[in-house]
Image (cartoon, rainbow, N blue to C red):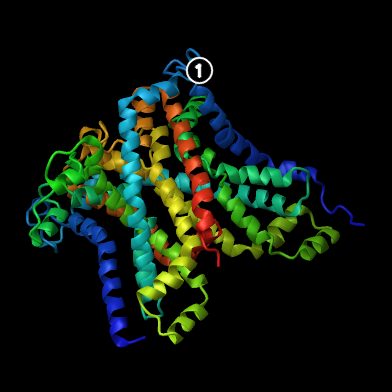
């Protein structure tokens, strides 16, 4: 028989600070948001109960749909760029070479640097007249771009003709933000991929070498399938982070408007704008609940559809 | 590995790392150029004359001293809070058996799924009701609990053999003494990790204080820099100087602890 070594009521005492903070600042706010989203909640407080009206308003608000489309484009471009570039660098770094640790540190540097300072310097690099980006393009004899002030869709710019709305693609302004955030987040994903690569048993590669397989076939038959749990993780994280993008949009292209002709207006920017520039807290809460549901269902979808195809070695 | 393969690897990796460093190089060199040289096109890759004037000028134009002070206050109190709450909670979740323990712990972890934007509006309205808007309280209190830190510390506490805990208790050690004298010294690496993450997090936090503060007396550096960016939207020499000052502390911490920081990120990813 085991004696009780410790009074279980002590648990309450020790957990009080945590439970209060989590209760007041994590749990209660979720209920608060759900409730606020059902009211016409403005400057003066709750106002009138309007049921699902805020959600219906979302569905008919063309600025909301623009923000939603922009967020989708942002995510669709961020995912492949992040996945392939970071996996590529991780594979290069996964070699025993002198100085590899320093290179890894260098790739990681942007991750710990503040988004505000990073956005400042990229905005400067993207300057349409005297920016570094246009200067470097000029060296390659490519005409200058308007970068953050370019509202035209990138497919429009590439094909050089006017296209229907759904074929225009994201504006170059939005893509410029994608490039910056991919650059900033790269080191994190490289490190995650490196951890995954280091978990792959060396025996597979030795066997492949004996069989005379090399280069791309080793990647296709060994690395890619065995790294897939990590790829899956990076895919999920990148999707979630992309749907939440806000700071670089606010810093580089807004306020007041969410970029040229609203083409960098993303969901969280739209939320922020409605809540804190127009005091539409109810409507803003509805957007935040919508965002939460989207992220939740994407997570579930990826777990149900993508994960069964992931090879857990 | 063949020689050609090694050389190809180096060339690719070094080119990539130059791309990773280029914006930093551009920030620092711009901060050392005269305003006239900075707007010249084509730009000079190396400043013709090193101009230090932008740094005192940036500090003069905006109250960066105050912003730094605010951030340091916020970072220190948040860090102390996180260390205390994570230690107590992780200890409780590891060593004290009580009904509903697992359920409570899992509900805490589930909270980590909720994205920050969901918290902004209710956070703002709750802090307004508490009368805490535009105070240090608004920037510290909601963040003195970090669920990931609780999780991390619990993982480390679990590796302490239960027999150590039992014999300490039998010898008449109080649970609080066990925590502070025996358990915490055994998980020092985890505590250092939590401290570093907390400090870097507080230093870089932006969206929350952007919403919750309105005055220079309370604003942390990132928000101060962001407003400076809007006010001085064309003077990139001053902006670069201010940005360089703002990122230097984190970069120093990062270079001192880079191994630990990178490996912590690695582990957090693999376990997630």
Q: Is residue A78 left or right of residue A253?
A: right
- Does any portion of residue A36 appear in the rendered image? yes
Q: Residue at x 34, y 29 (%)?
A: A64
* Numbered label tally: 1
Tell me the quadrant of the picture where the C terminus of chain B can be found.
bottom right
Q: Quadrant of residue A259?
A: top left
State which chain disc 1 sits on. A
Residue A205 x/y as whole percent: 46, 79
Query: Relative to B170, does residue A171 appear above or below in the rendering?
Result: above
Residue B243 x/y as whole percent: 28, 51
Residue A291 x/y as whole percent: 44, 36
Q: Quadrant of residue A107?
A: bottom left
Query: Which residue appears farthest toward the top when viewing the image?
Result: A48
Q: Secondary structure at mark 1?
A: loop
Query: Relative to B210, does residue A84 appear above or below in the rendering?
Result: below
Is residue B72 or residue A184 the one in the foreground? A184
Query: Relative to B251, does residue B211 appear above or below in the rendering?
Result: above
Dot 1 alpha-carbon crowd within 10 angstroms: few under 14, some 14 to 19, many 20 or more: some
Is residue A18 or residue A76 the one in the foreground? A76
Q: Residue at x 31, y 82 (%)?
A: B5
Q: Is residue B266 left or right of residue A109?
A: right
Say which residue label 1 marks. A51
Is residue B43 or residue A92 the one in the foreground? A92
- Does any portion of residue B61 appear in the rendered image? no
Residue A78 x/y as whole percent: 34, 51
Is residue B267 or residue A292 the one in the foreground? A292
Q: Residue at x 47, y 35 (%)?
A: B118
Q: Quadrant of residue A133?
A: bottom left
Tell me the quadrant of the picture where the N terminus of chain B can be found.
bottom left
Q: Residue at x 49, y 36 (%)?
A: A293
């Amino acid at each position: 028989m085991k004696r009780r070594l410790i009074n279980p009521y002590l648990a309450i005492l020790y957990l009080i600070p945590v439970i209060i903070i989590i209760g007041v600042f994590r749990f209660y706010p979720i209920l608060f948001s759900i409730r606020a989203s059902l009211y016409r909640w403005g400057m003066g407080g709750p106002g009138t109960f309007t049921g699902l009206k805020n959600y219906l308003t979302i569905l008919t608000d063309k600025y909301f749909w623009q923000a939603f489309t922009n967020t989708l484009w942002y995510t669709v471009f961020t995912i492949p760029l992040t996945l392939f570039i970071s996996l590529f660098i991780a594979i290069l770094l996964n070699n025993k070479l002198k100085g590899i640790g320093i290179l890894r540190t260098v790739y990681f540097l942007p991750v710990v640097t503040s988004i505000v300072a990073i956005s400042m310097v990229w905005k400067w690099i993207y300057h349409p007249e005297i920016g570094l980006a246009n200067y470097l393009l000029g060296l390659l004899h490519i005409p200058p771009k308007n970068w953050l002030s370019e509202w035209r869709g990138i497919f429009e710019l590439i094909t050089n003709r006017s296209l229907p709305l759904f074929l225009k693609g994201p504006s170059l302004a939005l893509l410029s933000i994608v490039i910056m955030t991919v650059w900033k987040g790269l080191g994190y994903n490289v490190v995650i991929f490196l951890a995954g690569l280091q978990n792959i048993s060396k025996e597979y590669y030795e066997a492949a070498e004996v069989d005379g397989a090399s280069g791309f076939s080793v990647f296709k038959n060994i690395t890619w399938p065995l790294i897939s749990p990590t790829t899956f993780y990076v895919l999920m994280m990148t999707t979630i982070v992309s749907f939440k993008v806000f700071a670089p949009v606010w810093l580089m292209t807004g306020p007041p408007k969410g970029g040229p002709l609203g083409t960098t207006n993303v969901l969280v920017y739209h939320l922020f704008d409605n809540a804190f520039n127009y005091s539409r807290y109810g409507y803003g809460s509805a957007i935040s609940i919508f965002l939460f549901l989207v992220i939740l269902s994407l997570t579930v979808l990826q777990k149900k559809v993508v994960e069964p195809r992931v090879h857990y070695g | 590995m063949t020689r050609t393969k090694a050389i190809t690897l180096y060339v690719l990796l070094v080119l990539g790392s130059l791309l990773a460093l280029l914006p930093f190089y551009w920030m620092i060199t711009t901060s050392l150029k005269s305003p006239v040289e900075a707007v010249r096109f084509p730009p000079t890759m190396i400043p013709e004359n090193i101009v230090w004037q932008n740094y005192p000028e940036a500090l003069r134009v905006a109250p960066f001293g105050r912003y730094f002070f605010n951030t340091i206050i916020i970072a220190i109190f948040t860090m102390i809070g996180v260390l205390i709450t994570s230690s107590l909670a992780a200890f409780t979740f590891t060593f004290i058996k009580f009904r509903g323990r697992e359920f409570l712990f899992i509900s805490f972890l589930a909270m980590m799924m909720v994205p920050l934007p969901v918290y902004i509006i209710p956070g703002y309205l709750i802090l307004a009701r508490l009368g805490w808007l535009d105070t240090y309280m608004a920037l510290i209190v909601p963040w003195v609990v970090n669920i990931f830190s609780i999780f991390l510390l619990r993982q480390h506490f679990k590796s302490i053999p239960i027999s150590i805990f039992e014999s300490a208790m039998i010898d008449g050690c109080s649970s609080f003494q066990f925590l502070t004298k025996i358990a915490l010294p055994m998980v020092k690496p985890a505590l250092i990790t939590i401290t570093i993450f907390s400090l870097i997090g507080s230093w870089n936090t932006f969206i929350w204080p952007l919403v919750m503060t309105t005055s220079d007396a309370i604003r942390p550096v990132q928000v101060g820099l962001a407003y400076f960016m809007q006010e001085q939207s064309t003077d990139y020499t001053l902006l670069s100087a201010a940005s360089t000052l703002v990122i230097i502390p984190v970069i120093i911490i990062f270079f001192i602890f880079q191994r630990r920081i990178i490996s912590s990120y690695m582990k957090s990813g693999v376990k997630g």
